[in-house]
Image: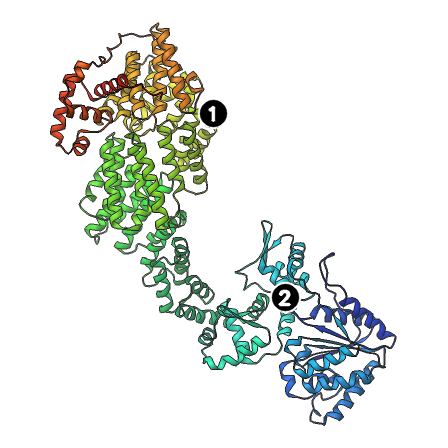
Amino acid sequence: MLKDVEQPATAPSTPRTPGAPRTPGSPELVTAALAALERGEGSVLVAEQHGVLGRRALVGHARAEAARRGTRVVHGRATHVDRVAPLSTLRAALSAGVPDAHRDFDVDHLTALRQVRAQLVGLAGDGGVLVCLDDFHHADDATALALRVLIPGLATTPVLWLLSLRPAQASPAVRGVVDVLLDAGARLLPARWPTGDDARRLCAQVLGAEPDPAVVAIATDVDGDAERVLRALHEAGHIQVGGGTAVLAADADRQPLPSWLVADVRAALGDLAATPTAVLHAGAVLGRAFTVHEAAALLRKPVPELLQAAAQLVEAGVLAPDAGGLAFRSELVRRVVYAGLAEPVRVALHREAADVVAAEGGAPAEVVRHLERGGRRGSPAVVEALRKAVRERTGGPVEAAELAVKLLDVVGDDHPGGDELVVEAVRLLALAGRTGEAWDLAVRALSRVPGPATQTRLVCALGELADGRDPGHDHVVVEYARRALARPDLDDQHRADLAAVQAYRLAAAGHTDAAESAAARARAAGGEAVVFGSAARAQVALRRGELSRSLELARAAVREADRTGPFPRRHHSRLWLCAPLVALDRFDEVHSTLTVVAGESAQLGTAWPMPRWQYHRARAHLASGRLRTAESDAELAVRSARDRPFTPLLGRALLLLAEIRTGLGDLGAAEANLQEAEQVGGRGAGAARLAWRRVLWLCAADRHDEAAEVAEGLLSGADLLAITATAPSPVAPVLVGLARRRADEHRVNQVVRVAQQLSELNPGVLGVAAAAAHATGLRDGDPDAVVRAAELNRLSDRRAAAAAALADAGRLARAHDDPDRARELLEQARQTWAACGVPLAPGRTGSYLADGPRQTRPPREAVPEPSLELWASLTETEVRVARLVAQGLTNKAIATRLTLSPNTIGTHVRNAFTKLQVTNRVELALQVIAHDRDRAPRRTP
């Protein structure tokens, strides 16, 4: 029994927010009763407890008000043990005036009752006395019956009785006495705790933010003292306010709580025996609903020993049945119990809890949390269970990545099997899109020089991760691979994997010869060596203008990635197909590939490759002349890339967006994109790509002399074939036009040779043939050749390129003093541009030819118009072959389509050349187009 007899003194009052919701009446009734006490009138007040703190706030108010008035206060709190000693509750509250408080507890009840009455009369003789009996529901039956006699007998004595209790936990005798007192005129003080919307409004007013349900629950748990408790929890960091919301911090258990709050909650809990207290400690450490079996395992006690303690805690209202077993009725109580644990005890319990949760099959994240708080060392069984969860990616890649990082932090790098865990953590971080963390972890692990297998796997991981970092990191990966290759203990497969990574990064850096050499060393092996080796060779082939071979190699990389398993596919290897497919005019296949990538990403649960995905889609739309759609995709790519640090795609996406907006005539926005791309030049905006987009912008701004100067630098210092082969829109015609403006025949011929070389390397690729015809026609001043280029572009679905060719043909026709044809061609260009969503572009496109040198050589003869006689001479098979050639198929592809040999197809192609009087596949395609146009009206492009 806790007790004290207080002399008049000042006492702190609980601050209250003006306007805070509360049920009025309780403080006023207490104040009125104390005023009546000064007039010699005694009374009885009964306060029912409901929240965690009971009626502590009300009792505190009564005591403070009595102290202010100079009234004596007798305060006592009943506990569980009071029920074993008759009259212990009442006598202990009054025992301060007795030299030996408990020496005569064995006297008969009547004598004891007389002593209590005498003490009360003596205390009340000087201005009255306030008797507060807190937690009266624990009072013994003798005390309850004594009050039934004492209170009426002292009706004329200035004694104010304040009884605070939980009726549901009171004995029948206590409840009966309270009922009798209420019937005799005792006042029942109304409860003050807020509930429902009142509690939510109170929290919002006190915290200045919208509370979450957990915060509201605490406000409803603290009867009459919610404002003070909420402020205290906020100041202690247990309630966090931000973004207009107030939430109960999940990880603030170890933050200290105000001592007054801890003392009040502990007092509300009462004096618990050792076993119930231990159960509460176990539940507080577990931090969630728990079973009796879990508590028994954590405390290493038999389950039957804890059953009675658990029932007692439920009866006392501290715990409550829950779907998961038992749970604290109040999170505040759980936090107070946890805060009361000594640090060594807390650490020991958490370490034991890790074993218990792992043995019960609990969530890996919960096991890790206990390990983090239990000294960061777990039993071998716990560590193995967590490693299994990492390997099986329990909860998905994102959760598995977080688990792997935390597990590494817990067990340390020197733990047995740590190398394997590091590799898995790097892969999972990459899967989760946390590429920066994955890179740093791999580099840190490589600095320890792990075993050959681990070193190889980490370097391979860096090879992939370098796609998301600055271009300079290509050389970093190459150097890591070189150091690993210097080890004498590498097996052949590891050497092949490392050579493939070297090739992949060298190709990305533009070192085609070195990349080809490194890729050759990786060909014989399988697995990731083939994946990255083939991908590297695909990049090399693309830069060399071998478009079909680039696509074949990219497909080989994809096939091997599918065969090897999920991790190589994490790189979304199918995206390697997009660049060669765009170069080959196969735009439908690009979009089909992107659809597969989206589905595969969802299936593997990988982080969405949004920047790369949108970037490739935008390139395909730009190449096919769908500029508005391309702009939307490029904007999304830029936005996504900005959110991901270390991505070189930001620079590339900005340059692509600048090119698209230049074509749309939005030169201000395009210039802003170019400037930002220059600022992030070290993040992927290569010098050649930047110079090319600057040339396009200057041409669109009618600053042709400046454009020609930039183009000269581009021609002097870059791999022109690589730029021409990889750009989504034609390069050669623009560069030829600018070189003609400067009357630089050398540069004109240089660009034309490159364009023709690219066309010869890729027979049947209409877009490439169109660019070569366009450049050649500009060099020769031949509008017919440029018109043929426009037709080829239309057939290959490159509408923007077709519009540019028609505009240039119109300029050339005007230069040849053929105004009627010039107007016709320019009108076709306008219509084609309008179909691309760019009505203003014809006024700019090709304008640099208007002031260029006049025609200096006669135009070449156009391809003869088809005649019925010539076409009638073709066999049915030759007609079918000619139509497939016009669709851009190679002899090998046609042979597969018609189930004939490539040699037979070659014979049919040559026969068609002879009979139709043409000399190459481009002219054959034009004949097919013209013949079909004569037979049916041509649709407007």
**Gap in angstroms between the C-alphas marked 2 and 1:** 61 Å
Question: Outermost residue, top direction?
Answer: 817
| Secondary structure type for disc 1 | loop
The quadrant in which residue 171 appears is: bottom right
10 Å neighbourhood of mark 1: few (<14), some, or many (≥20)? Answer: some
Q: Nearer the viewer, residue 784 or 846?
A: 784
Vertical comparison of 636 with 276: above or below: above
Q: Is residue 935 left or right of residue 37?
A: left
Q: Nearer the viewer, residue 907 or 667?
A: 907
Q: Is residue 791 left or right of residue 910?
A: right
Residue at horizontal 26 percent and vertical 18 percent from the top: 935
The residue to which callout 1 is attached is 666
Q: Is residue 820 visible?
A: yes
Q: Label for residue 767?
A: none
Residue 32, position as x, y percentages in the image: 82, 69
Q: Is residue 108 left or right of residue 856?
A: right
Colour convention: rainbow
Q: Label for residue 221?
A: 2
The number of numbered discs placed on residues in the rendered structure image is 2
| Secondary structure type for disc 2 | helix
Residue 460, position as x, y percentages in the image: 29, 48
Residue at horizontal 72 percent and vertical 79 percent from the top: 178
The numbered mark, 2 or 1, whose residue comes first in the sequence reads 2
The residue type indicated by label 2 comes to Asp
Which one is closest to the eye, mark 2 or mark 1?
2
Quadrant of the image containing the N terminus? bottom right
Residue 440, position as x, y percentages in the image: 39, 50
Q: Nearer the viewer, residue 850 or 456?
A: 850
The quadrant in which residue 466 appears is: top left
Residue 718, position as x, y percentages in the image: 31, 27
